[in-house]
Image (cartoon, rainbow, N blue to C red):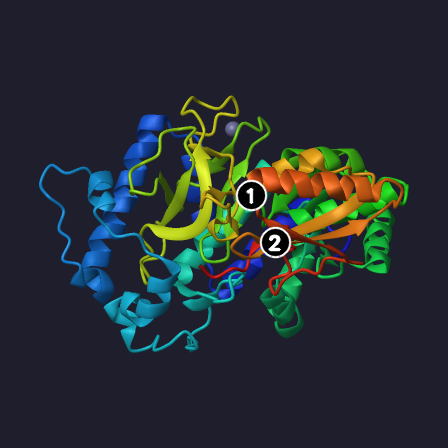
Amino acid sequence: MYHLPAPVRRGLYFGLQRAVGSRIAEAWREFQRWEGFSPARLEENVDVKLSRVLTRATAESGYYRKLGLVRNSGETVKDFLQRFPVLTREQLREHFTDIVVDRLRGEILSPASKSSRRYDWLVVKTGGTTGHPTTVVHDAQARDWGRATRLASAKYCGHPLGTRYFRLWGSEPDLLKEEATLHLRIQRNLLGEIPLNAFRAKEHELRHHWETLRAHPEIHSMMAYVDAAVSLALFIEDQQLDRPKLKAIMACAGTVMPEWRDILQRAFSAEVFDKYGSRECCDIACECREHSGLHVYSPNVFVEIVDEQGNRCEPGKTGRILVTMLNNPSFPMIRYQIGDMGQWAEPSGCPCGLPYPRLKDLQGRQDDMLVTQDDTLLTSVFVRHFIGFSLIRQLIREWQLEQTGAGQFIFRYIPTDRANLDANLKKIRESFKLAFGQDAHIQLCEVASIQPGATGKIRWIINSWKR
Ligand SMILES: [Zn+2]
């Protein structure tokens, strides 16, 4: 399948999907139809879907029925939505079976349930970076739409379905599945994927990744865990290796810091596209070629950003991201608190022509916020910028900051050069104190590598302090 041209790949992909019972082709057509909507038409269509989700949930799901919510006459669907409670991970875990609609209550008895039918509902487990995996159900429709969102991401990043690509990935369930199901292997082959294991962060493995990139000069695209791609880029620069030439990098599973974008562009000569998504909500938003924010995939999700009091945030104000899934009727997820912080971009039209609203400044995970002496919460993006300011990149290749208690921090670092290292570490320690308070205690800890967590993501900022 290696030398197949892109249109043949595309045809085979849809053929295989049809054969396993997926209706991805229909979902994808519908998805693309929405791209041409005017803002007014988009809003109308979102309202129709949203209204259907809320009506069905209150009628068919035990969890939502018990809330006794009824839409008032004359109330807009978005105002009705705002009266729904936020769905947290804890609530998802506690009410899992009760959220399942009546029709499937007898089948989905626990997160361990499996459908006996082919291409049907599926229990999806989230990565669990926070230590507690959460499970949700995706029905066949949600799975089709999830696939459509992935096709959209590939298209917006300039490597549409059929284009071959490297996949620098590290999700454990993904790796296990790759070993287990032949179907997935065939599908990935069909998509023309060259896998690179993002769990491998040691030097000889980074070298192996570089050799793989060099062995395929005909491939110009990469989808990658952004942190793994940055590690690889830094390794290539530090070792002064020939730089592989790519055109596009889809940066996934983490916030793309401005300095990371520069590093990736430099090391791979590639345009970097920030993509936002999660296992439980599929792909949610992606940058277009204008790089003026991430377009939300309105055909599949309705996104809200709210402040601490639950009020809608205006563009430019950071808040919690809530996601309502629009195509998962068997397991309503309404105002799901995904655990990330972000902002809306100004609602002006994007020159690319997509009508979807744009997110900007994704501020990383809520759980990774660090706490200062006077109890202020600092987002991981802020902390990263702050430290980046005082750190000399030629001396320290990578680092990780972990908060282990009130005013207690561990700073792990991989040194590249020892001359002047001590002076730089002293400066870093001083800037920590400026950010976190003069009594903050920072333990400096030299390490040979920074290991990815259970889900394969390297976490640069960790709060392991249970408050
Ligand atoms: Zn755009």
Disc 1 Cβ-to-ligand 1 distance below 8 Å = no
| Figure quadrant of residue 428 | top right
For the point 62% across and 52% down, the residue is 441
- In this rendering, would 185 be left or right of 323? right
Tag of residue 436: 1
Tag of residue 409: 2
* Crowd class of label 2 (few under 14; some 14 to 19; many from 20; radius 10 Å): many
Q: Considering only vertical position in the picture, is 181 above or below 383?
A: below
* Crowd class of label 1 (few under 14; some 14 to 19; many from 20; radius 10 Å): many
Tag of residue 272: none
Question: Percent x, y for residue 256?
Answer: 61, 40
Question: 405 or 282: which is nearer to us?
Answer: 405
Question: 77 or 340: which is nearer to us?
Answer: 340
- In this rendering, would 389 be left or right of 156? right
Q: Secondary structure at mark 2?
A: strand
Q: Considering only order in the chain, which callout, 2 or 1, is on the residue closer to the N terminus?
A: 2
Q: Are marks 1 and 2 in contact (CB under 8 Å)?
A: yes
Q: Residue furthest front?
A: 439
Question: Percent x, y for residue 173?
Answer: 59, 67
Question: Percent x, y for residue 134?
Answer: 44, 65
Question: Percent x, y for residue 261?
Answer: 68, 35
